[in-house]
Image (cartoon, grey):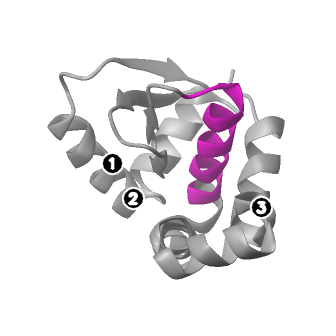
Amino acid sequence: MNKKFYTLAQWTWGLPQTLAGAALYLACRKKPSFDYKGAKVTVWNKDSGISLGKFIFVPGTHDQFLLDHEFGHSVQSLILGPAYFILVGAPSFLWNRLPYFRRLRKKTGRSYYSVPFEKSANKLGRRNTLR
């Protein structure tokens, strides 16, 4: 995938989530950031990552796996466009943050990455590299 195409697509087809990401990026503008596969990654002091179109936010303790995973969500944004928030963003947020799902994962030993939208992000993030 071409970085110019990726950027154009995120600012058009992925506009809702990219605008939200841009607003969050501006709010975190004093935090360290870097480019990753065409996305703008910001390191913040939260305990989890989030991907909003072209903008990715990761904790300071992030690793390569998390960068690829969050980039995978960015690719999902390209595929789903405006439907990303409904089909991936909201379910991912709820799966991550709701105490009910946290207790369920702990009780059953189920991996956070076992649900389709998280598993897909892992595959897409590993497979896609921008030129």
Is 107 drawn above or below residue 26 in the view shown? Answer: below
Where disc 1 sits, the SS reads helix
- Residue 9 is situated, as x and y percent measured from the top left of the image, at 51, 48
The amino acid type, in three-letter code, at marker 3 is Ser
State the predominant SS element of the stretch in magenta.
helix
Write down the residue under mark 1: 21
Between disc 3 and disc 2, the foreground one is 3
Point 46% across, 35% down: residue: 58
Image quadrant where residue 29 sits: top left
Q: Is residue 127 left or right of residue 6?
A: right
Is 103 drawn above or below residue 17 in the view shown? Answer: below
Is 71 drawn above or below residue 16 in the view shown? Answer: above
The amino acid type, in three-letter code, at marker 2 is Gln
Point 60% across, 67% down: residue: 80
- Residue 97 is situated, as x and y percent measured from the top left of the image, at 46, 67
Considering every residue shown, the one lying at the far front of the view is: 107
Write down the residue under mark 2: 17
Write down the residue under mark 3: 111
